[in-house]
């Protein structure tokens, strides 16, 4: 066969192949466009659906806790993803601990009462002193409790916990990143809580003579091995303390994933057994 004729045959074959490719690409584009339109219609028909992560994260609080507070999806995602916990998660979990303590005390299942302060309390105390937080306990007598818990936020980079045992007159400091060179800073934090308790007793409950508090940095506790799980650790410390347990606590950094999963379940249910 002559070369010119072969060239014409292959030229037409190539043209048909190219047109088929263009047509196939066009059909795929039309299908994708139709699918996008359908997804938009579905989203418009179900605006309250949790199927859209963006809507869930930017929406008002989704999960309601027993005290009426709520947790937004973007906050709960921090716990699920193992990231640094913000004040919303810390306060919500400590709120559940408080509810559990009150429930057991009311049912006479336990005589151990706990009061949990907000994570904003200590920060406000440092900034404004006692007068700045005086009204935070206007409806409660903290001295009717056995244990007071103060979560401490260190400039949004670290969490620690202060526990005041009222019957033993002992203030303890719990930190998952203990450092001996920071002992003076730890004692300063405990002294701030000590001074607050003295002023609270003197101003509201006529406790003119308050017994000296023993200050203790607790060092026989599990320590974190990463840079983001400090919030989970103070929640675990609080969980053990409010059950009347004392250090050492038998968990480690290798258990953090399971603790996070357990906390997530408890917060979604709004209940700690």
Image (cartoon, helix red, strand yellow):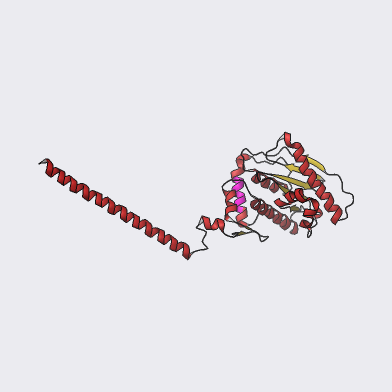
Q: Is residue 182 above or below residue 98?
A: above
The C terminus lies in quadrant: bottom right
**In front here: 2 or 71?**
2
Q: Is residue 199 above or below residue 68?
A: above
Q: Residue at x 81, y 49 (%)?
A: 196
Looking at this rendering, what residue extends furthest in the bottom direction? 45
Q: Position of residue 108 (x, y in %)?
A: 75, 57
Q: Position of residue 251 (x, y in %)?
A: 65, 41
Q: Position of residue 69 (x, y in %)?
A: 65, 59
All told, the count of numbered labels is 0
Looking at this rendering, what residue extends furthest in the top direction? 181
Q: Residue at x 59, y 44 (%)?
A: 257
Report if residue 263 lies within the magenta region.
yes
Taking the image as shown, residue 46 lies to the left or right of residue 121, namely: left
The N terminus lies in quadrant: top left
Residue 107 image-quadrant placement: bottom right
Looking at this rendering, what residue extends furthest in the left direction? 1
Report if residue 174 lies within the magenta region.
no
Q: Could you tell me what secondary structure mostly forms the magenta stretch?
A: helix
Looking at this rendering, what residue extends furthest in the right direction? 208
Q: Position of residue 250 (x, y in %)?
A: 67, 41
Q: Which residues are magenta?
A: 258-265
Taking the image as shown, residue 49 lies to the left or right of residue 7, namely: right
* Residue 273 in view, yes or no: no
* Residue 127 in view, yes or no: yes
């Amino acid at each position: 066969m002559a070369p010119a004729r072969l060239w014409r045959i292959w030229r037409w074959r190539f043209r048909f192949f190219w047109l088929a490719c263009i047509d196939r690409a066009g059909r795929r584009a039309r299908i994708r466009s139709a699918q996008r339109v359908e997804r938009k219609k579905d989203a418009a028909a179900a605006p309250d659906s949790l199927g859209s992560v963006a809507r869930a994260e930017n929406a008002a609080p989704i999960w309601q806790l027993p005290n009426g507070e709520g947790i937004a999806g973007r906050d709960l995602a921090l716990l699920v993803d193992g990231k640094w916990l913000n004040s919303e998660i810390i306060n919500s979990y400590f709120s559940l601990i408080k509810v559990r303590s009150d429930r057991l005390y009311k049912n006479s299942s336990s005589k151990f009462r706990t009061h949990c302060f907000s994570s904003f309390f200590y920060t406000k105390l440092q900034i404004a002193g006692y007068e700045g937080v005086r009204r935070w306990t206007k409806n409660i007598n903290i001295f009717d409790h056995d244990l007071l818990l103060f979560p401490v936020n260190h400039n949004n980079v670290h969490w620690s916990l202060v526990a005041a045992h009222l019957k033993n007159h002992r203030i303890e400091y719990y930190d998952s990143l203990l450092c001996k060179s920071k002992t003076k800073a730890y004692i300063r934090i405990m002294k701030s809580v000590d001074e607050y308790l003295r002023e609270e007793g003197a101003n509201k409950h006529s406790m003119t003579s308050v017994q000296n508090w023993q200050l203790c940095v607790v060092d026989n506790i599990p320590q974190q091995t990463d840079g983001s799980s400090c919030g989970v650790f103070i929640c675990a410390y609080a969980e053990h303390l409010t059950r009347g347990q004392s250090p050492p606590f038998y968990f480690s950094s290798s258990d953090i994933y399971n603790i996070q999963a357990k906390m997530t379940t408890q917060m979604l249910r709004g209940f700690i057994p």
